[in-house]
Image (cartoon, grey):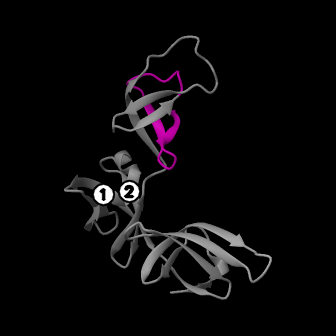
Amino acid sequence: MPKINGNEIRPGNVLEHDGGLWAAVKVDHVKPGKGGAFAQVEMKNLRDGRKLNERFRSADKVERVRLEQKDMQFLYESDGMLTIMDMETYDQVEVPADILGDRRPFLQDGMTIVVEFHDSEALNATLPQKVICKIVETEPVVKGQTAANSFKPAILDNGVRVMVPPFVGQDEDIVVNTETMEYSERA
């Protein structure tokens, strides 16, 4: 595995540190008035979700891990495990449902997700950036309510609450951004 200097760490890098795999969440480069510069790195453990703040000097060497990304198709969920299929080899793999975190409700049957593997262990999964959902409950459209920044709450078919513009009504399909979990546009 390639070693990088402590000052080359960027957000999103996966590092092997203290016998675990950590993702760099936030990196601040600090140059104190006295002493050498360092990188203050906030890291999240990819296996158990623990957080850690660590200082790396530019002379420190850190193992950078490259995760293998595969397109996988979601098949079904049972007992808190998601069964997904490799799109090239058609091998089926089970991963824990909490690998998606709070984006889990946006997972739909047959959806293609990107799963990151280290050896054969699934560590992370990302959904497509935009997903189409149906509004099951919202306030009715009010004529003449055209204020630019007025949004109203809506409940989607997957149970998630989002804020939508006043012109969007019940039983309409909308596009939701899965990264920000916000309304994007009408479908």
Q: Residue furthest left?
A: 79
What is the secondary structure assignment of the residue under circle 2?
helix
**Relative image position of residue 92 (x, y in whole percent):** 25, 65
Q: Which residue is mark 2?
A: 100
Q: Quadrant of residue 147?
A: top right
**Relative image position of residue 167 (x, y in whole percent):** 52, 21
Say left or right for 166 vs 140: right
What is the secondary structure assignment of the residue under circle 1?
helix
**Relative image position of residue 153 (x, y in whole percent):** 46, 28
Q: Which residue is mark 1?
A: 97
Nearest the eye: 133 or 13: 13
Q: Residue at x 47, y 47 (%)?
A: 178
**Relative image position of residue 151 (x, y in whole percent):** 54, 27
Nearest the eye: 68 or 81: 81
Asked whether residue 187 appears in the rendered view, the answer is: no
Say left or right for 116 vs 27: left
- Extent of the magenta region: 165-187
Asked whether residue 102 appears in the rendered view, the answer is: yes
Disc tally is 2
Q: CA distance from mark 2 to mark 1?
A: 6 Å
Residue type at mark 1: give it. Answer: Ala
Check residue 175 for magenta coloring: yes
